[in-house]
Image (cartoon, coloured by chain):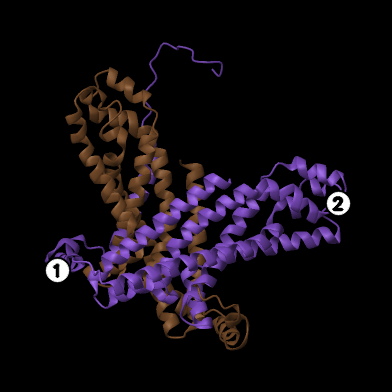
Amino acid sequence: MAEVRPGALLFGEGRGRFLSFLGEMFPPDLSAEFLGFTLRPALETIQISVLGTALAVVIGFPLAIFAASNLSFTGVLHDREVEGRPAHKALRLIPYLAARLVLNVLRAVPEFVWALIFVRAVGLGPFPGVLAIGVAYGGILGKVFAEIFEGVNPRPAEALQATGASRFSTFLYGFLPEALPNLASYALYRWECAIRAAAILGFVGAGGIGQQIEISMRMFNQHETLTFILILLVMVTGVDRLCAFVRRRVL
Amino acid sequence: MSRGPVFSGAIPKRPGVSWKTWGSGLLLLAVLVWSYSGTEANFRDLIGEEGRSQMWKFVSGLWPPETSLKFLGGAAWAAVQTLAISIMGTVLAVIIAFVLMAFASENLMVRGVLFERAGAGTPAGRLRYASYWAARTAMAVLRSVPEIVLAIIFIFAVGLGPFAGVLALGLHTGGVLGKLYAEVLENVDPRPIEALQATGAGRFSIFLYGLLPQAFPQLLAYTLYRWEVNIRTATILGIIGGGGIGLKLHIAISLFLQNQLLVLIAVIFVLVTAVDFLSSYLRRRLT
């Protein structure tokens, strides 16, 4: 099925082409002029990932509130009011189910496809990349955020409710403080993924370093390709380190 | 003070927001503004007349979905091909990772009970140390080149088609799995290893009987997890020429065949969900 033909890679023409391709890549193009040129797409990739993740949080957070069962229809926030009144409960189930459905749709479509759709809608450039990451990761963040909310210890919320706190205060002081470190940590992890995704989305015209790799490859300018790959490598490693640092020191 | 709270007579001040929090908040804001200006983000364009009409045209084109038997058959066939790519890619990755992990696990090559007697200074010790670093470096390189870049390189080498996708998946995932495997091996209980060493077993026997049996369930779990990741990646690799359902998707989008899109996305959804389900089922049964 997968047409595995080791021979095609290890012998004859395939090997020749593979080796000559690798040979052409060396040495990487490290002239000051070219490195100066690479700076912008590299920064652009970072910007896409940052803004895309921010958009994902903006999309995912409100959806997560509706998609967390203990915030939308059960638990301390609702038990008193819905007990013995199935109609009330059913009414509160509607936003829950709607939010879950939206999250599922956002996640079901791969970010690549979102990028292709947004490239069509707003044109080539980094912006469709931002939208694609924002929408696809919004679906993922929404689901995980909802799970984090559902895992929050309910006792502080119960205590708050016993003091007569409103539903909003209970959420703000009972649920949010415990969930926040986990939410932030997961958003940070997604940013790590987003930087890879931002680089890859460039291949379909969503700006950044991926678009440059694609162009260099199509121009058979393999020295430049290698430089871009190396820069991507440094960027991804750097972001991994940075996130590990932030997680240890701040969260 | 450390013995417990002593009431000092004054109610402690509510802790204020520290300058660190303010600082990181401002920094985050600055990064966001910088990113906003750099990505030519223009939400007004998106929801403005032009963007809206473009998107509406796109969405309205999705309906009715193409349901001719020929197209559905083709989509199903492509989905099976994507599945095959993900499986073969994972198998290749397991082979690569299996070879690398033995060299990359600290407790087998560099330190731990096996080395209390035979120190690091001996030539054999140095050789082991060198192979440890070589394996670690190889894995780092494999991991850091994205699958899509590998796929393009292999398309040059073996031509368009699923095999390029298999190679790309296999190499990248091989690096990832190698690292995960090595970590599993490093975290096994050292006592069986000690016991085996005391009987005079060689390093290979220790690996085979002391490490592997303990590590096996974890190795399997990681492999299945990466398979879940790979089925998604296999879809993406199709878009740049690796065959399978991604290729169909790319064709449908480039040729404005929106009515095929809904079916293809549904097929991808079913495929990915089915693999997730199967993988978690296997994980529960086997580990």
Q: Nearer the viewer, residue B178 or B118?
A: B178
- Residue at x 26% of width, y 64% of height: B262
Tag shown at residue A131: none
- Residue at x 31% of width, y 51% of height: A104
Q: CA distance from mark 2 to mark 1?
A: 73 Å
To which chain does the residue with label 2 belong?
Answer: B
Residue bearing mark 2: B118
* Same chain check for tags 2 and 1: yes
Q: Can you name the residue that lies furthest to the left here?
A: B49
Chain A representation colour: brown
Residue bearing mark 1: B50
Q: Nearer the viewer, residue B118 or B191?
A: B191
Compared with residue A140, is residue A96 higher up or lower down, i.e. above or below? above
Q: Can you name the residue that lies furthest to the front here?
A: B69
To which chain does the residue with label 1 belong?
Answer: B
Residue type highlighted by circle 1: Glu
Residue B39, visible in the rendered structure: no
* Residue B156 located left or right of residue B35: right
Q: Quadrant of the C terminus of chain A?
A: top left
The percent coordinates of residue A182 (x first, y second) are 42, 40
- For label 2, count other residues whose C-alpha is less than 10 Å away and answer few (under 14), some (14-19) or many (20+): few
